[in-house]
Image: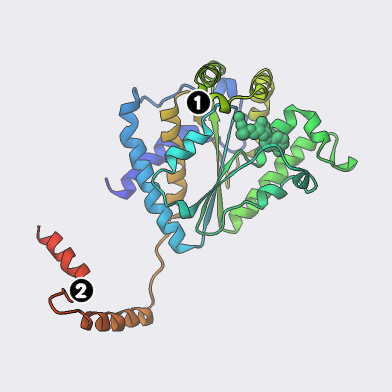
Amino acid sequence: MATDKRAERIARFIEPLRVKPGSRVDLTEDFDPAFKAGIKKKKDGVELLQTGVELLADYQRRLAAQDTHGVLVCLQSLDAGGKDGTIRHVMSGVNPQGVHVAGFKVPSAEEIDHDYLWRYAARLPARGEIGIFNRSHYEEVLVVRVHPEILDRQKLPPEARGKGLWRRRYREINDWERYLTDNGFTVVKMFLNLSKEEQRARFLRRIDVPERNWKFSASDARERARWDDYQRAFSQMLSATSTEWAPWYVIPADRKWFARICAAAVLAHTLIEIDPRYPEVSDEARRQLADVKRDLVKEAPKGAAPDPYLASADRKGAR
Ligand code: AMP
Ligand code: MG
């Protein structure tokens, strides 16, 4: 399929997932974790995922070659939402050299000693790279909001606390992302939206399968008990921080295979919009290449093709 056709198809596919800037989101009402866009079975979605993964690999090479833009992907979800598996599948086709994954856990003492965005800024992608945040600066308005005791530990001066704190953080985050966007770093944010029942099933699997035990901790169960508080915090976050320059996508996450298709599509769309190009070689550089080529061709030993690459390309063409 031609690239424009694919690009159009992807844009149409992800449209319902995008949170319209300025809209008020109520997660429980507005987004269905089991949505699958009319695709009935996992096998019916294979081709679509493949298309997304191939596009990504191609565009990532161009992004790296052009070395002008960077992409920051922020992944958020509740526990067992499928962040790790999504990263593994969606990035399966891309060159590992061009991708960096940064995971964020409970902050260290050193991190707490800085402003709250410091540790995220330190792990941003460079130009030409795709950086993936597995959890992100959004934890600062999620887990920190649901657990005020974490905020207490952040050593904020009194004037930085009190009423309006969350609204201020939303604004600061929007401003920071605007700054990144203005300077060539596209920010794309995905929330893997899991239902409470599917989380229950995945937790049980982590408990039942010994090889998965390590993925489960008692704190996961404690967080689950705060389900409604998290849904509220996510709803407010989505409403306040889906912007024209860095929109949120709510990814239906109850079916892992569908979530992966969506994530690949969102990322492919982002790269298509950036439209990175291989650098043009100057006339002078082209002349130099021709000179070197002439010398290399002359070096061909007896019996060898003067230019083995062209010779094999000719053979392939003739077939
Ligand atoms: P996991 O991703 O399962 O390894 O868990 C990481 C844990 O770190 C989660 O429970 C997060 O809520 C927690 N975490 C991530 N960022 C922060 C933060 N800024 N402050 C406090 N806890 C955090
Ligand atoms: Mg966990």
Q: Residue furthest left?
A: 319
Q: Look at discs 1 and 2 and give the one toward the viewer.
A: 1
Q: Which residue is mark 1?
A: 211
Q: Which residue is mark 2?
A: 307
Regarding residue 165, the answer to whether it shows in the image is yes
Regarding residue 237, the answer to whether it shows in the image is no
Q: Write the residue at 74% across / 42% down.
A: 108
Q: Write the residue at 76% across / 41% down.
A: 168
Left or right position of 294 against 157: left
Query: Helix, strand or loop at disc 1?
Result: helix
Toward which corner of the image does residue 92 lie, by quadrant? top left
Q: Which mark is residue 197?
A: none
- Which residue is nearer to you in this view: 97 or 288? 97
Task: Give the percent coordinates (x, y) of residue 112.
Answer: 78, 44
Query: Helix, strand or loop at disc 2?
Result: loop
Q: Split into 4 quadrants, where in the image is the N terminus? A: top left
> Which amino acid is tagged 1?
Glu
Task: Give the percent coordinates (x, y) of residue 48.
Answer: 34, 36
Q: Write the residue at 45% across / 57% down.
A: 63
